[in-house]
Image: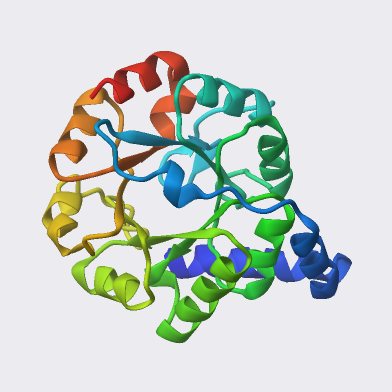
Amino acid sequence: MLADLTANSVADALARREHRSLDLVERAAIDRAPALDALTVLRPASHVKVIAEIKRASPSRGSLASIEDPAELARIYELGGASAISVLTEGRKFKGSLDDLEAVRAAVSIPVLRKDFIATPYQVFEARAAGADLVLLIVAALDDAMLQELFELITSLGMTPLVETHSADELERAKAVGARLIGVNARDLSTFELDRDLFGRLADRFPSDAIRVAESAVLSAADVAHYRAGGADVVLVGEALVTGDPMANLSAFLAV
């Protein structure tokens, strides 16, 4: 499934490239105001930090929320205390778009993450051109050479890579490219099965200077507390915020 999701995202990017060349996207990326310093914003603190996600749907759960105005939801997230906003830009299964990312970037003053299945430089330039401050890289979707190339491109454009892992081996690969913002996704993107304890088993393997992000399986404050007890500095939350009361849930999560 991960291979299909990545292939489809790359195909969609190639289609966009037919109408907007790499040169044009590169120039737009370079012309953007500098990216925000996400590493400083997300640095470990006495409380857990939250990356709040704009998420309409997923392959495992189907439709979650219509989210007609992603910018307004992002403003609610910022007001509620989120440290950063994640925007799903994949269109086929997650019903997102780069337009969502542009709208959110214009609406908030905190860092914005492009969450997609990134596997080409074109997609990285698109992210910066749309105003992203962070870009997700999924280790399982990339070979070592492309992971290194995209990591270096993201950083050269002033953005921060969030390098997502799902095993000890993948965490070692994230460390090898120099990642300082590393996520562990409790959801296996090949099977969509959840392992809520995976983060805790891998937490000791993180570099000492890395920011540790727990992803997926956050539905309640108890889930946040579970990840915090396992060593998480940051939790990335989508479903619980788009299907419930985002302000109330953020308040509960941030109180952990």
Q: Quadrant of residue 50?
A: top left
Report the quarter where the C terminus lies: top left
Rendered residue at 76%/54% (across/down)? 32
Please state if 164 lies on the left or on the right of 256 as rendered. right
Please state if 41 lies on the left or on the right of 204 as rendered. right
Q: As displayed, is residue 50 above or below residue 36? A: above
The location of residue 155, given as percent across then percent down, is 54, 67
Please state if 220 lies on the left or on the right of 74 as rendered. left
Rendered residue at 30%/43% (across/down)? 44
Rendered residue at 41%/83% (across/down)? 144
Q: As displayed, is residue 47 above or below residue 1? A: above
Rendered residue at 67%/53% (across/down)? 34
Front-most of residues 101 and 239: 101
Please state if 146 lies on the left or on the right of 60 as rendered. right
Q: As displayed, is residue 90 above or below residue 63? A: below
The location of residue 219, given as percent across then percent down, is 30, 29
Q: How many marks?
A: 0
Report the quarter where the N terminus lies: bottom left
The location of residue 9, given as percent across then percent down, is 61, 63
Colour scheme shown: rainbow
The location of residue 77, given as percent across then percent down, is 51, 25
